[in-house]
Amino acid sequence: MTPVLSDILTHKREEIAAAKAQRPLDEVKAAAADTDIPRNFYRAVTEPTRRLKIIAEIKRASPSAGLIREDFDPVALARQYHEHGAAAISCLTDAKFFQGELKFIRQIKDAVPLPVLRKDFIVDPYQVYEARAAGADAILLIAECLGEPQMIDLLILATELKLTVLLEVHDLESLVQVKPHLGFPHPGYQLLGINNRDLRTMTTDLQHTIDLLSEVPDKKVLVSESGIRTHADIATLLHNGVYRVLVGEHLMRQPDPGLALRELIHGDDGGESFSI
């Protein structure tokens, strides 16, 4: 585990302990049970099968980039994404390292009909109930942050709460480890994410997804994440049978993120326009 990831997880465990002291688990479970049925994130991202589906991300900062967007309004961003063709939204909720807030999820869902992923460093069942209570339709689980038994328990809990899981890996070793659990415990609730960011150097390379494709049993559920910046990048992935992508930092850096999303899908020079 890299020092950056280790620091994040150390702080996250302290944060979870503080949250439990302030709001007991039974209270969070009750709030989760009283929340509307989640929107179907899995279906929104996978159907139709051979159509481009973009999960557009909302984040203000990151450990690798620092402050990404000073003019930050999650609701306005969500509306732009919805208007310009996003299939779903990913929302960073980590406060210390990404300047996110859990309340953004409800604000976004009240503004647009798209399903929303809680993107955070989830290592405890408390956070899964917390995500459900906050209105999330899906959660991110990062393989490099979890032991195998812990990952299995969180997959089962998420499915019980009708949450889609985006199970993310960064390298071949992690992909091989999670392959036996893809689609567990029930197909239709889990996506596989390949993150193109090298956790050691924090650089991104789109080729990383393509290099790992031979180890992916079902490309229908595959999401390529990070390092996607141009219409040509999207074309490269589609050519290799990858139809689902998550794009964040590139969009957040643009003056008009909605227009930038539209250009990813349709291009800006009258060239090929991808079906969504």
Image (cartoon, rainbow, N blue to C red):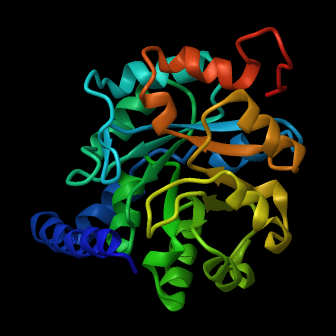
Q: Quadrant of residue 172?
A: bottom right
Counting from the top left corner in percent of width and height, residue 40 is at 65, 46
Q: Position of residue 228 (x, y in %)?
A: 62, 40
> Residue at position x 84%, y 36% from top?
51
Quarter of the image with the N terminus is bottom left
Against 192, is 144 above or below? below
Which image quadrant is residue 243 in?
A: top right
Q: Height in image: 124 above or below 44?
A: below
Q: Quadrant of residue 88?
A: top right
* Residue 227 shown left or right of residue 93 in the figure: right
Which residue occupies the extreme top position in the image?
270
* Left or right: 248 as drawn, with respect to 73: right
Figure disc tally: 0
* Residue at image coords 61%, 79%: 174
Q: Quadrant of the C terminus?
A: top right
Q: Is residue 78 left or right of residue 75?
A: right
Q: Is residue 160 left or right of residue 7?
A: right
Q: Is residue 214 above or below residue 138?
A: below
Q: Nearer the viewer, residue 9 or 5?
A: 5
Q: Residue 181 in the image: state x and y as whole percent.
A: 69, 81
Front-most of 208 and 259? Answer: 208
Residue 125 location (% of width, % of height): 38, 74
Which residue is at 39% across, 51% downward?
A: 34
Q: Is residue 239 above or below residue 119?
A: above
